[in-house]
Amino acid sequence: MGCTMMRKCHLNTCPVGIATQDPELRKKFAGKPEHVVNYLFLLAEEVRTHLAKLGLSSLQEAVGRTDLLRPFHNKGIPKASLLNFDAILVNALSLRPGTNIRGGSVAQDFELGKRMDNLLIKQAKDVIEGRGKHVTVHMDITNEDRAFATTLSYHIAKRYGDAGLPNDSNISVFLKGSAGQSFCAFLAKGVRVTLEGDANDYVGKGLSGGEVIIFPPKDLPPDFKSEDNVVIGNVALYGATSGRAFIRGLAAERFCVRNSGATAVIEGVGDHGCEYMTGGTAVILGVTGRNFAAGMSGGIAYVLNVDGQFEEKYNASTVDLFRLELPEDLETVESLIREFYDLTGSAVAAALLSKWPESAKSFVKVFPKEYQRALKQFAEEKAKQEEKTIAPSSKVNDIEEVIADGEMRKKQLERLDKIRGFMKYKRETEFYRPAIQRMQDWNEIYSHKGVRKNLRVQAARCMDCGVPFCQSSHGCPLGNIIPRWNDLVFKEDWKEALAQLLQTNSFPEFTGRVCPAPCEGACVLGINEPPVTIKNIECAIIDRAFEHGWIKPCPPEMRTGKKVAVVGSGPAGLACALQLNKAGHLVTVYERNDRVGGLLQYGIPTMKLGKDVVQRRVELMKAEGIEFKPSTDVGKDVSPQDLLNNNDAVVLTTGSTWPRDLPIPGRHLEGIHFAMSFLETWQKKQLGNDIDYLPLCAKNKDVIIIGGGDTGVDCIATSLRQGARSVVTFEILPQRVYVAKGFANSRTPS
């Protein structure tokens, strides 16, 4: 059970129209209330069946009936037999005889009438209702008092909305003690809560404009150091949108997670600080835990690198570190530290201010890469707008010129939307050159230039789904990290996209052209929309790398001295040789044909895979130290025993070259050929081999092809270009129809 689409309900981008209020997305939801009713009826029927087998008529009767439970003995896990469930399966009546253990028999009293918020709201009523401007409240608090001031914020929001109290009104609350969970959750603007003591988890959760100030009790021993003690629990300021928090002491784990606008100053945090932060400011005046700023895409954090080990603790994949040098950064940090000292009396803040600005050298600025990119893009667009404003207007000759210029300006100003790209942009379908044009030559059928023009738009369609099946075993056999490099292409970080692609794929220039793309078949977006053009993006990444000279020979730095013979130079043989060579072994590849490449060279026509692409990779591998021996038939030109004697290992990657025959009447007649013989003969003719190709040439002949798979399509394409009079294909399966999903057959056109 669970969502397989995005798992980001808060973004209002649910692709199936469930967790969204977007009218266009809601149209995609095909469900009806009756379906839910039917489901619950079926579920209830199944539950009643199980209850009946136990002799019960309702779920209430099942509560507490541990006598009906039996441990399941898993023989496959020996350790499971060591578990003793007696304490869990004890009947509640044996612990409290005479008690009614039926569920719901005793009503639960939440004692809501005793909540501190009731008293707080009563004292602040005049300010909430606009009859007063200011009120100060003093209280003691215990850890049983949960979600303090949250109901107060509800009444403020109910009256004033998200804006909070008017600017000339405020509520000040002074507390002593230990606060319970969710202290000041969703605290509204205009409310300041000062706590002398400590607090449990979720302090300032969803902070909405209010101010939270926490410091240890003032009557502690003189040697007590707040910077060494935890004063608030986990997940403080989770999802805060605005407001300020000043905490004298340490926070536990996940401080400021998903903060999108609040300002916080604290003396230290645990692991995963500022995780997934998208806005706001955090100043950390002490140590941090591991994985700081993981997934951080916005906002700024300033960290005092007290132990010099912060570089080992932050998440370098999402943020960069800078010194505190810019005047605006120095001013921001100093003013926040000064305010922190005034409100909490922090000794750490006092020490930093006494040596300012020298102490600023110990700070690092944590700046999200995504935020930097957005600021750079904004600056570029602003500069372009200023240039257009300054530039003299050209003479207008025709009204059409004005319309065209306006449309161009609109396109330039339009910013691609990655979050909602899957619903805004359509799948690119014009992958290929015009049919008339490609029928006249043997060049690749793909319109690489045309595809690249629209590539960022296609990358924006990748919706960062919750369960990316495209990279699973039944999506991509190689395990390509597809969502990652899709996102990097959208950000135009091509070098990093290449690094991610090469982690799992040895030859993306081959798979990007001839792979049947099961990743697109597994694409989650394909559930109700045409899938992302993953194959095109993959091909564009590696082609761009070759064009820019990023792919260079990389011989191993050291050799192991081990020798390995690889028999066969097809895709498996080349990949095997490449990886063995990277490990430092001396690799020799034997190929019985006159050129290296196997299926890539002689099985796949040039229309799908240009032989210059294959040769480019072979030359690169030669430069890395791999030796190729074509026209060498193992078993004839060199014996298997010699290979074993002269090498430390032998790898057989010969492939399946024996064709499947069709034993039917008339099979012995002339003019019947195996597909691979037909394709290989023509490939050799194209490459300049002096061979007799006419017996296998389809020119001016009526051609029948048995089998409509990829190989059959290759035979169709070759026959048509050779000038066949007619081509008929027999296929055992019915024709596949894709009209329902709105995209064309994924098979390569001839």
Image (tube, grey):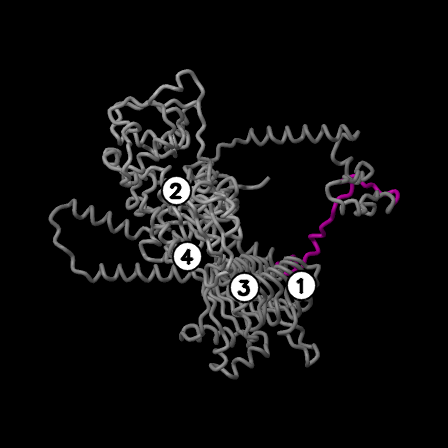
Q: Nearer the viewer, residue 315 or 195?
A: 315
On residue 625, the disc is 4
Is residue 214 in sight in this rendering? yes
Q: How far apart are marks 2 and 4 (CA)?
A: 35 Å
Q: Nearer the viewer, residue 110 or 137?
A: 110
The x and y percentages for residue 511 are 41, 44
Between circles 4 and 3, the one closer to the viewer is 4
Question: In the rendering, at what x and y percent does residue 709 appear?
Answer: 41, 30
Labels 1 & 2 near each other (Cβ < 8 A): no
Label 1 or label 4, whichever comes before in sequence order: 1
* Residue on which the image places disc 1: 179
In the rendered image of this protein, does residue 360 appear above or below residue 486? below
Q: How crowded is mark 3: few (under 14 residues within 10 Å), some or many (20 or more)?
A: many
Q: Do the residues labelled 3 and 1 touch (CB within 8 Å)?
A: no
Residue 480 position, x and y percent, is 47, 47
Q: Confirm whether the magenta stretch covers residue 675.
A: no
Q: If you read the primary sequence from the N terminus, does the residue marked by circle 2 or circle 4 appear first?
A: 2
Callout 3 amino acid: Phe
Q: Which of marks 1 and 2 is in front?
A: 2
- Number of the label disc, if any, that sits on residue 292: 3
- Indicate the secondary structure of the residue bearing disc 4: loop
Q: In the rendered structure, are the residues bearing label 2 and label 3 in contact, judged by CB atoms less than 8 Å apart?
A: no
Q: How far apart are labels 1 and 2 at the CA level? A: 53 Å
Res. 208 in view: no
Q: How far apart are marks 3 and 1 (CA)?
A: 26 Å
**Label 2 belongs to which residue?**
533
Range covered by the magenta-colored residues: 97-122
Q: Is mark 3 on a helix, strand or loop?
A: loop
